Amino acid sequence: MIRHIVLFKVADRSPRAAAEQVETLRSALEPLAASVPGVLGLRVSADTTSIATHWDAALETEHASWEDLAAYQAHPEHRRAVEAIDAVVAERAVVDYEVT
């Protein structure tokens, strides 16, 4: 199994705006679980600690193979979601790894 994790820092980190921007992430990304083939699991989680050095949200997806991950990333629905969230994302960090 392949796990894909993306951490996000939102553009406006004030508490109210950050919460709204995390909802934008959630509403753009969570539907991909049902619409993109090869996604075994997908969740968007918010960091609720308000610690300045923390990332604001995390996306975790699971795929059966590296090929499924590549297909997810290239899928038109995923590309549209990325475009939709670019307006609210200041930074991203990504890690992909094989779960053994």
Image: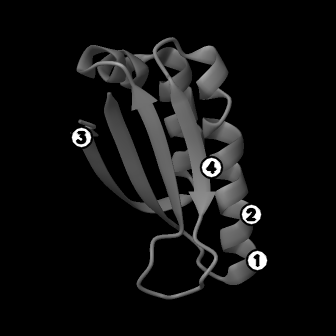
| Label 3: which secondary element | strand
Of residues 99 and 23, the one drawn nearer to the viewer in this rendering: 99
Name the residue at the bottom extreme. 51
Other-residue count near label 4 (Cα within 10 Å), few / some / many at <14 / 14–19 / ≥20: many
Q: Amino acid at mark 2?
A: Glu
Q: Position of residue 70 (x, y in %)?
A: 30, 21
Q: Amino acid at mark 4?
A: Leu
**In the drawing, what numbered circle is on residue 20?**
2
| Label 2: which secondary element | helix
Report the residue at 41% width, 84% height from top. Answer: 53
Q: How is the image coloured?
A: one colour
Circle count = 4
Report the quarter where the C terminus lies. top left
**In the drawing, what numbered circle is on residue 97?**
3
Q: Position of residue 63 (x, y in %)?
A: 39, 24
Above or below — where is 74 with respect to 94?
above
> Of discs 3 and 4, which sits in the foreground?
3
| Label 4: which secondary element | helix
Label 1 and label 4: CA atoms lie apart by: 15 Å
Label 1 and label 2: CA atoms lie apart by: 6 Å
Whether residue 59 sits left or right of residue 91 in the image: it is right
**Residue labelled with disc 4:** 25
> Of discs 3 and 2, which sits in the foreground?
3
Q: Position of residue 59 (x, y in %)?
A: 50, 48
Label 3 and label 1: CA atoms lie apart by: 33 Å
Report the residue at 26% width, 41% height from top. Answer: 96
